[in-house]
Structure formats: structure tokens, C-alpha cells
């Protein structure tokens, strides 16, 4: 009975955000839509690689998708701060659905060309540029600041469950029915999230501030981040890790084909492994959200994912590659959840849209650089170089960041070590002088 009560309590803690009706509507819609999105992503990358046979051109696909975010996300943040997030999301999800049906038609008729995919991907990127900061800043309206980390983590669970299920289903569907059906499922799935958004009712209050020129408001947002040491470190570390350690979508298909000498089923298997690792991380982060944000874990995740990517040089067989990709997926998701939470908790409502646009910019806006870098490295040195080249670049760039901000980062790590040590040292030792706590 005691064990049952513990399990029940743990489940309530893990899924606490689902007590909010608005969050449930959004969450259920995302459950359906994200599965379709990952089917589409998997099919699209494989379709491009089959058409072109070039890792560089696959990398260029990522450049087209994320270049709008690199160029215009900060402007989107100003737009998001001015209007209701719910209305913005309905608009962007409708655009995604339209592009999905267009892609379905092109592939179904057998007239799809590489340049057409690039155009559709670019348009998707423009819509995503507005969608991402709106969606990220919408969470706090759905669950409040108290449960924001849990809400982010629960949303990550469905994102990563979709990342597991989507590629797996996509592999089966592509083999049996063709890629067109993957794009069709994606297009139809947006109906669920749009329906959920129409059911949500929030007490939106327009920020009481004087509207200035867009560039001036962007400057104010950046100045706000600069004034907060935690936000500055979060931004710098995110810039490095998200650019060089988040290129799985580009590296894995080439890795499966050139290193493991396998086809679509192994490629989707590796994608699903990354999703499984991320899903487990999201559940873990949702469970430990009640303990607050661990800044030391944020730093350790940044270093750990870089090291794991370097170690992928030894993953020459499918079993080992599956395990290591899953571990990378776990660490990356834990890192992203911590980054997101650090931005949300340390930001006032007036600046949230602009600050989350910086999060979006760092999370995916830098992807074109990482995609182009990883694609070029694999084009020059073969598929085995993708992960190690990215991990090495990340480690080298983290060194100056940690050096510049060593005092603050040392305090984050030092405090964590002190607390952990105090919990493990018997109290009687303190009295006999074996160990003197700094808190005394």
C-alpha cells in the first residue's frame, strides 16, 4: 500500500501540469500533430538524400528551413509580444497544414523536384520563425510560473514520443506505401492542434508599454538579457551547443548509409533511438521539476553531449550506435529543458516574447550553420566524421565561454558539490572537526 501511494504521488508530480484544462487541450493536440511532423521530417530528409545522393545538399535543406529563423527570429519576438499568442499559433499552424498538403500533392503526382522541396522548406521556416517564440512564451499562460518547468518537460515528452513513433511509422509507411502518405498524415494532423487552440481560453492582457520602433524593441530585449548574468551564460552556452551538437537530422541518414551500410529501416531506427533517449529525459525532468532548476546540471549537460559526440568515432556497429545516439538524445533534451526553464523563470512578462525569440534563435536559428558545417565535414571526410567533428567544435568553443564566465559557473558547480557533500557527510563528523560546513 505504501509503495502504491508512492507511485501515485510520483505520477501526480510528473503530470501536474495536466490539471490545467487549457494545457490539456494544447497537449493533446500536440500529441497528434507532432507524430505527423516527425513522419514528415523523416520522409523528407530521406527523400532528398535519395534524389540527390549528397550529404551537402541534405545539409542545405536544414539551411533553408532554419535560415529565416537565423535572420528574422528577433523581429518575430517583437511581433509575439504585441499580440495574443493563441491567435498567432492558429495562424502558423494553418500555414504548416497548407504546406503539408502541397508537399503531399507534389510527391503523390511524382513531379517533386529538389528545388520545390527547398522552396516549401523555406516557407515552413518563415512560419516556424513566428511559431516557436509564440509557442514557447505561451506555456506560462497555460500553467503559470510555478509549474512552467513541468509544463515544458511534459510538452517535451510528447515531442520525443513523437520522435520515437514518427520515424518508426514513417519507415514502415515509406516502404509499403511511399513517402506521399507520410506527408499526407502530417498535413491532416495539424487539424488536431488547431482544434485544441480554438478550445483554449486565456485571460490575455496586452502589455502596458509604449510601442517603439521594432529595432528599438529588439535592442531593449537584448539589453534586458545582457543585464542578467544567468541569461547571458544560458545564451552563450546555448549558442555553442545548439549549433554544433544538435545536427542529428543531418548526420544520422548519412551515418546509416555510409558507416553502417544500411537503408531506411536502420536510419529510422537510429532516429527513434534518439527519440527514446529524449523521451526518457523529458519524463525525468518533469519528475524532478519540483526541486527547481539545477544550474550545475545545465553546465554538465553541455560538456557531456560534446564528449559523447566525439566518442561516436567508435560507433562502427548498429548496436553501439543505437545506444550512443540514445544517450546523446537524453543529454540534449535535458539540456534544452534546462535552457528553456532558465529563460522563462528569469524573465518578466513584458520581455517574454523577445527573450523566447532569442531562445528560438539559439535553439534552431543557428541550425543552418551547424547543418552546413556537419554536411561539409561529411562530404569531405565521410559519414563517420559528422558527430566527432561537431563534438570537437563544441568543446573548443565552450572553453572560452567557461573561461570568461568562470566565476559564476564555478559558483554554480561549487555550490552543487558542497550541497551534495553535506548530504552525505554524517552530522557527527562535523562536531569532531572532520568536516566544517561553510553554512555554519
Image (cartoon, helix red, strand yellow):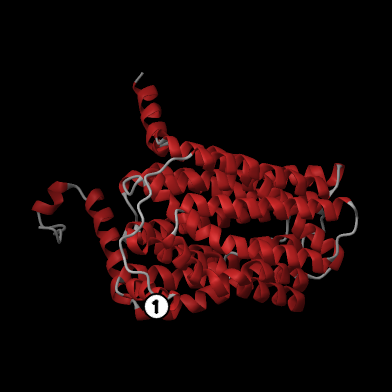
Residue 176, by quadrant, is: top right
Q: Residue furthest top?
A: 1
Q: Is residue 306 above or below residue 99?
A: below
Residue situated in front as seen by the camera: 173 or 212: 212
Task: Left or right? Give the position of 60 relative to 344.
Answer: right
Residue at 37% from the left image edge and 36% from the top image edge: 13
Residue situated in front as seen by the camera: 48 or 274: 48
The quadrant in which the C terminus is found is bottom left
Q: Secondary structure at mark 1?
A: helix
Task: Left or right? Give the position of 277 relative to 413.
Answer: right
Task: Left or right? Give the position of 112 relative to 187.
Answer: right
Q: Residues within 10 Å of mark 1 (few under 14, many from 20)?
A: few
Residue situated in front as seen by the camera: 402 or 24: 24
Residue at 39% from the left image edge and 36% from the top image edge: 16
Residue 129 image point, x, y percent: 56, 64
What residue does disc 1 label? 216
Residue situated in front as seen by the camera: 2 or 435: 2
Residue 73 image point, x, y percent: 52, 69
Residue at 59% from the left image edge and 65% from the top image edge: 309
Residue at 36% from the left image edge and 56% from the top image edge: 206
Let me know if residue 318 appears in the view.
Answer: no
Task: Left or right? Give the position of 53 relative to 246.
Answer: right
Let me know if residue 130 appears in the view.
Answer: yes
| Total numbered labels | 1
The quadrant in which the N terminus is found is top left
Residue 28 image point, x, y percent: 55, 37
Q: Residue furthest right?
A: 110
Residue 245 image point, x, y percent: 57, 66
Residue 260, by quadrant, is: bottom right
Amino acid at each position: 500500500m505504501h509503495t502504491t501511494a508512492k507511485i501515485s504521488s510520483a505520477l501526480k508530480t510528473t503530470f501536474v501540469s495536466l490539471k490545467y484544462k487549457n494545457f490539456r487541450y494544447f497537449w493533446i493536440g500536440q500529441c497528434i500533430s507532432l507524430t505527423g511532423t516527425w513522419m514528415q521530417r523523416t520522409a523528407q530528409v530521406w527523400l532528398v538524400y535519395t534524389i540527390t545522393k549528397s550529404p551537402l545538399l541534405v545539409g542545405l535543406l536544414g539551411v533553408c528551413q532554419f535560415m529565416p529563423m537565423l535572420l528574422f527570429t528577433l523581429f518575430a519576438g517583437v511581433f509575439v509580444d504585441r499580440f495574443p499568442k493563441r491567435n498567432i499559433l492558429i495562424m502558423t499552424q494553418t500555414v504548416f497544414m497548407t504546406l503539408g498538403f502541397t508537399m503531399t500533392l507534389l510527391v503523390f503526382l511524382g513531379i517533386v523536384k529538389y528545388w520545390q522541396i527547398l522552396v516549401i522548406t523555406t516557407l515552413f521556416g518563415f512560419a516556424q520563425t513566428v511559431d516557436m517564440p509564440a509557442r514557447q512564451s505561451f506555456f506560462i499562460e497555460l500553467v503559470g510560473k510555478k509549474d512552467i518547468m513541468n509544463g515544458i518537460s511534459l510538452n517535451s515528452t510528447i515531442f520525443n514520443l513523437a520522435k520515437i513513433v514518427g520515424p518508426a511509422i514513417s519507415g514502415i509507411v515509406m516502404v509499403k506505401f511511399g513517402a506521399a502518405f507520410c506527408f499526407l498524415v502530417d498535413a491532416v494532423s495539424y487539424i488536431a492542434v488547431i482544434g485544441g487552440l480554438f478550445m483554449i481560453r486565456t485571460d490575455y492582457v496586452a502589455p502596458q508599454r509604449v510601442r517603439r520602433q521594432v529595432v528599438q524593441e529588439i535592442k531593449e530585449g537584448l539589453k534586458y538579457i545582457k543585464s542578467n548574468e544567468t541569461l547571458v551564460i544560458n545564451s552563450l552556452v546555448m549558442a555553442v551547443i545548439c549549433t554544433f551538437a544538435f545536427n542529428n537530422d543531418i548526420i544520422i541518414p548519412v551515418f546509416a548509409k555510409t558507416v553502417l551500410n544500411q537503408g531506411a529501416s536502420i536510419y529510422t531506427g537510429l532516429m527513434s533511438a534518439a527519440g527514446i533517449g529524449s523521451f526518457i529525459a523529458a519524463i525525468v525532468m518533469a519528475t524532478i521539476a519540483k526541486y527547481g532548476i539545477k544550474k550545475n546540471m545545465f553546465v554538465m549537460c553541455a560538456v557531456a553531449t560534446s564528449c559523447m559526440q566525439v566518442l561516436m568515432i567508435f560507433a562502427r556497429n548498429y548496436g553501439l550506435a543505437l545506444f550512443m545516439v540514445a544517450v546523446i538524445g537524453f543529454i540534449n533534451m535535458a539540456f534544452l529543458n534546462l535552457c528553456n526553464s532558465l529563460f522563462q523563470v528569469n524573465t518578466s512578462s513584458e520581455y517574454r516574447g523577445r527573450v523566447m525569440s532569442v531562445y528560438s534563435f539559439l535553439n534552431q536559428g543557428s541550425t543552418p550553420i551547424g547543418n552546413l558545417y556537419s554536411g561539409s565535414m561529411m562530404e569531405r571526410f565521410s559519414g563517420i566524421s559528422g558527430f566527432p567533428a561537431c563534438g570537437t567544435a563544441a568543446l573548443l568553443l565552450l572553453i572560452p565561454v567557461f573561461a570568461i564566465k568562470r566565476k559564476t559557473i564555478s559558483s554554480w558547480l561549487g555550490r552543487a558539490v558542497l550541497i551534495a557533500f553535506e548530504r552525505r557527510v554524517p552530522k557527527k563528523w562535523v562536531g569532531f572537526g572532520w568536516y566544517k560546513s561553510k553554512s555554519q
